[in-house]
Structure formats: structure tokens, C-alpha cells
Image (cartoon, rainbow, N blue to C red):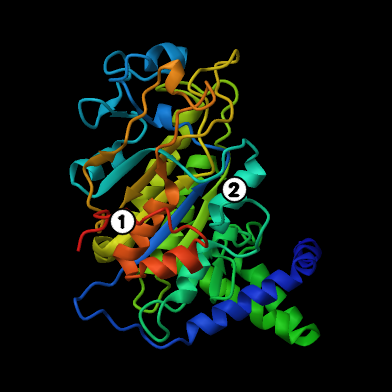
Amino acid sequence: MIDCVENRLLTSRRGLLLGGASFAAWAYLPKFARAADGRDPRLIVVILRGALDGLSTVAPIGDPDYAGLHGSIALAADGAHPAIPLDSFFALHPAMPEFSRMYRDKHAAVIHAVSTPYRDRSHFDGQDVLESGYAGPGRVQSGWLNRALDALPRGERVSSGLAVGPTTPLVLRGNAPTVGWAPVALPQADDDTAMRLVDLYRHRDPALATALSQGLQLDKAASGDDMKRKPGNAVAQMRQVARGAAKLMAADDGPRIAALAFDGWDTHANEGGPVGRLAFLLGGLDGALAEFEGGLGERWRDSVVVVATEFGRTARINGTDGTDHGTGTIALLAGGAVRGGRVIADWPGLKLANLHEGRDLKPTTDLRSVIKGVLQGQFGLSDRVLAETVFPDSASAKPMQGLVAS
């Protein structure tokens, strides 16, 4: 057992040392001061990798062309599993009752027919544009969220970001300090084995021993003694990740900005309608949002969660009851600081003549405008910083106003 775990650690020694150094820097930061207005804002960015079907998540059931295009997987206002009405035109997937509750409480909102500037259909390039914040792929190795963090005044409430997962998402890579936490970093190592490893490396590699010890402390703080790290399905893993991240962010001296990614949203075949594969994934996302709310506690009042994906999916289903790579999709906002209870959409319609390239929901809102509006509302970043530093060369994408409660 020791040999197996030792081999895994040796292969990731560099990453572990970097993670330990980040944790050490964060652990000794001074306590954060609250803003003069009493707000203590937090921002969590959730990336859904694989391209979310926005037309199946928030369905335009009031559009006369929707049901015919989406066919067997279209949501409906009635039937065995009716969609949850959001207004007279849009309805939410029935797998998301927690988001529906937040929406009714005016703490969640939907932005529909949204997209990054990317107009092709490569997951790799689409995710690069989504997370880098540039208009095209392959230009930088830093992300817009890290650049936003780096632009904040030093010594104030926000001094580091939290990267959740085995690797730091591109959106949070860059010059600003981050701390990494992966809830399944050592899933086979119990406490006794882990401490024996620390003791072993204390003599053979003191730097690695220090990093490992610090990483175990961070994992314990996030997980709690009652949180068992057993392999589970995607839904359980989404909730587990959100629960741990929220616990870290709820601390007075914890990070205020976090990023994480959930994989598996590429629904080419057997997507399912109100039940099925997509419903399963949306249930996990819905549970994760509830974990953020519960874990942040009173901090939820000043928090915003942004859920985004690299692009949407085709308006018409394919021959395998799935959807292919598309363009326009949705972004979701949740949190006590959200001015919610709204679907924000400049709806383009689903008639053939209105579809992007005759196949996709036409995007009418730039995702960068949405994110700029959240960053400005939460942290007061200026139009200039947002247009030149956070999202370079994006002056035409104005920050969307009124997304965050003042």
C-alpha cells in the first residue's frame, strides 16, 4: 500500500509542492476586513465542460418551433414530468428544484441565448475562449478570473483564489496567488497511511513532507471528519466538491473567489428529456448549488455563483436522440447577491431563418457582458479594467447592469 501511494506521489511531486506552497501562503494571510458597507462578497465560477444544452435546461416552451425541433427530448408544461414554469415563455428542467426555489426567492437568474465570441464547434478551442477571456483560442495561458483577482486592490478582502480539482482550471491560472484543493487527491490513503507517508518523506524529502502535510490539513478542513471520500457517481461527486469548497470559502480568512469544472456535458446521444442522462447531470448541478448555499451559510447573502459552458447544442435533435455541437446556450446565476427571479433574454426565435447557420440558437448576448456585470457588481472593477485587462479588447461588450443587488 505504501509503495503504491508513494509511486503516485512521486509522479506528481512538482504539483504537490506548488499546491503546498500556495496553501502555506494562504494560511498565513492576515484576516480579511469587511467592506465599509458590511458586504463580504464571494464569487464562484462553475464551468460545465462538454457544452450544455440550454434549450433543454431552460426550455422556451412558448416558442412555437421549439417542440418540433427538439422532438423526443423537448420539455413540456404537462405530462408525467412537467417542466417548472419560470414565466409565461420559459420553463426549467424538472431536475432542478433547488434552482427553482432560488429563482422564486429572487436569488437566481437565467441569461438565455448567450455565447462567448467563439463561433466554431471545437470543445478544446471553445473552452479556451471561455476560460482565457480572449476572443480567440490559443493566445494566452492565463484566465480572466485570475486577471480579475490580480486587478483588485492589494491588502483588501480578496487576496487569493481557490482552484477546486486535481488541476487549476485555465480561468484561474495567472499571476494572482491561488490555493488548490482536490477532494479526491488521495482517495485510497487513510489517515494512518497518510501520516506514515509524511514521516517517511520527512527524512527523505523534507520539502515534499511539508507540502503533503499542509495538503492533508487543507483537505481535512474542507471535508470535515464526517465527510467520507468514497468513489461515487457524478451527482454525489458534484455535491461533494461544492460542499468542500463552500466550507473553505465560508471561513473568515478563506478565499473569496473560486473556480471549478464539471465534465461530461457532451450529449451527442441519448440525451433524454425530463428524465435521462441530461436530467441526471442537471440533478448533480442542482445539488451542488444547494451545497454552496448551505455550506456558505450567512456568507450566501453576499455570494454569486456563475455557471457557464463553452457553447450550446443544436436546436434540432439528431438521429440518436441527442444534440450536436451548437452555439447559443444559457448562463445561470445563483446566490444571495443576485437580483434574480428573471430570465434575461433578447429572444431570437427558433424559426429556420432565425437560427445561427440554420442549426443553432442564435446568440444575442455576449457572455463577457454577463461576467463583467457580475465582477463589477461584486468587486467594483471599472469598465476600463474589465475591457482592457480582464477581457482584453472587449470594449464593445458592455457590463450588463443590475445583475447584483447593491
What SS does tag 2 mark? helix
- Please state if 255 lies on the left or on the right of 336 as rendered: right
**Snapshot quadrant of residue 191:** bottom right
Q: Is residue 109 above or below residue 31?
A: above
Which residue type carries mark 2? Gln
Numbered mark located on residue 294 in the image: 1
Q: Nearer the viewer, residue 252 or 174?
A: 174
Q: Looking at the figure, which quarter contains the N terminus?
A: bottom right
- Please state if 264 lies on the left or on the right of 383 as rendered: right
What SS does tag 1 mark? helix
Q: Nearer the viewer, residue 295 or 29?
A: 29
Location of mark 2 (residue): 127
Q: Residue at x 24, y 57 (%)?
A: 336
Which residue type carries mark 1? Gly
Q: Residue at x 52, y 68 (%)?
A: 146
Q: Are marks 2 and 1 in contact (CB under 8 Å)?
A: no
Numbered mark located on residue 66 in the image: none
